[in-house]
Image (spheres, rainbow, N blue to C red):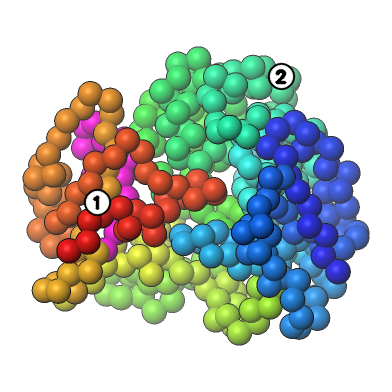
Amino acid sequence: MLDVLPFPGNEEVLRLLPRLVRVLAGDGPPIVPVPLDSGAEQIGMIGPFFAGGAPLDPRVALIVATSGSTGHPKGAMLSADALAASAAATRERLGGPGSWLLTLPAHHIAGLQVLLRGIADGTEPTVIDVRHGFDPAALVTAIDRMGAGRRYTSLIPAQLRKVLDHPAAAAAAADLDAILVGGGATSPDLVARALAAGLPIVRTYGMSETAGGCVYDGVALPGVTIRIDEPDASGAGRIALSGPMLALGYRNAPENEAFAESGWYRTDDLGALDGGVLRVLGRTDDAIGTGGLTVMPRVVEEAIDRIDGVTESAVVGLPDERLGQRVAAMIALSPGFEITAQAIGRTVADTLGRFAAPRSVLFVDRLPRLASGKPDRLAIIAAFPSD
């Protein structure tokens, strides 16, 4: 028996706190979070969670749809113990319990964890209305409502950029004790801007399968172990994670290799460990094979994002008859700023080599994104003219 629980995108979500208290206690049927305005398509996406198949593990308290990079969800099954372990590890790393500000849709794991951490810390979260998008001006009054004591929030990179572009919001955010930033790669330029503005950002790495972030600023949370599988000569390989906050597997997808090894989750991400600090290089399925060489989009995006006037970028591989794939970049620029595709290509070539330089460049006002805030790579690929 599963309980579909619709989550409002405003303060009405606080009415669900008693039910979330039960989730943390492992009391009652497992919940499946959905947005309040779920359409038939979204409900259909979680339909497989309710189909026959293997009996539901009695430890499951929450089944959360993963968004991945393509929008096709699987149901990560999380126990009450995993959720509690995640909250406790976050509390220890951040320096103690505190009050939390919700700025994200609460049906995704990052937003849901804000509510669950608040419950675990014995505080009631403050909520920003995000039904019509994130307004950084709302952050000012929301932070003021949080009161005294340690104060935390979570943002995705696109929200952080909006905060930095709003002086009053940036000043208010600088008074927080920690701002977790995750849900996608954070460009070096954005990190530098945030630190220069005095924002206490903490870059997080994790996913629904790990109950949210389990690596902060490259360092594993207490109880978490990072392993690099099948490393190449540079030490880069597939990231595997172990710890008490791991999911029990996927609902009705027991054959998935990600959980084939007991106690471990084998991600689709590539990374390397340098002195115990994790560096995420990108997703295995995003790797671009061009002219017999492999290009990781994230590395190219970081090089592009350092260029003056670039606000964000996404790099994908497009079919190419000669090369197999060619590197393509979708780039958003600051208002009034101009730069040529040739200049972009020269900068990347000087930094990473000619093989990594984008051969196709598309300038846009903003990147298309999934509901989770991650770049919608299928939409980005489709936006490029076909040969």
Residue 307 picture quarter: top left
Residue at screen point 12% across, 49% down: 345
Q: Disc number at residue 145?
A: 2
Task: Report crowding for label 1: few under 14, some 14 to 19, many 20 or more residues within 10 A (C-alpha).
Answer: many
Q: Is residue 62 magenta?
A: no
Q: Residue at x 69, y 45 (%)?
A: 37
Q: Amino acid at mark 2?
A: Arg
Disc marking residue 329: 1
Q: What amino acid type is highlighted by mark number 1?
A: Ala
Residue pushed farthest right?
27
- Whole-percent x, y for residue 230 in the image: 39, 79
Identify the magenta region.
301-317
**Image quarter hosting the N terminus:** bottom right
Name the residue furthest front: 40
- In the rendered image, the vertical position of residue 128 relative to residue 57, given as above or below: above
Q: Position of residue 136 (x, y in %)?
A: 53, 24
Quarter location, residue 105: top right
Of all residues, the one furthest to the top in this rendering is 168
Q: Residue at x 23, y 31 (%)?
A: 309
Q: Secondary structure at mark 1?
A: strand
> Is 220 rendered above or below residue 362?
below
Q: Nearer the viewer, residue 37 or 31?
A: 37
Q: Secondary structure at mark 2?
A: helix
Give the label, 2 or 1, closer to the camera. 1
Quadrant showing the C terminus: bottom left
Q: Position of residue 95 (x, y in %)?
A: 65, 38
Cα gap from disc 2 to disc 1, whole angstroms? 41 Å
Residue 308 colored in magenta in the image: yes
Residue 10 located left or right of residue 370: right
For residue 377, what is the image quadrant? bottom left
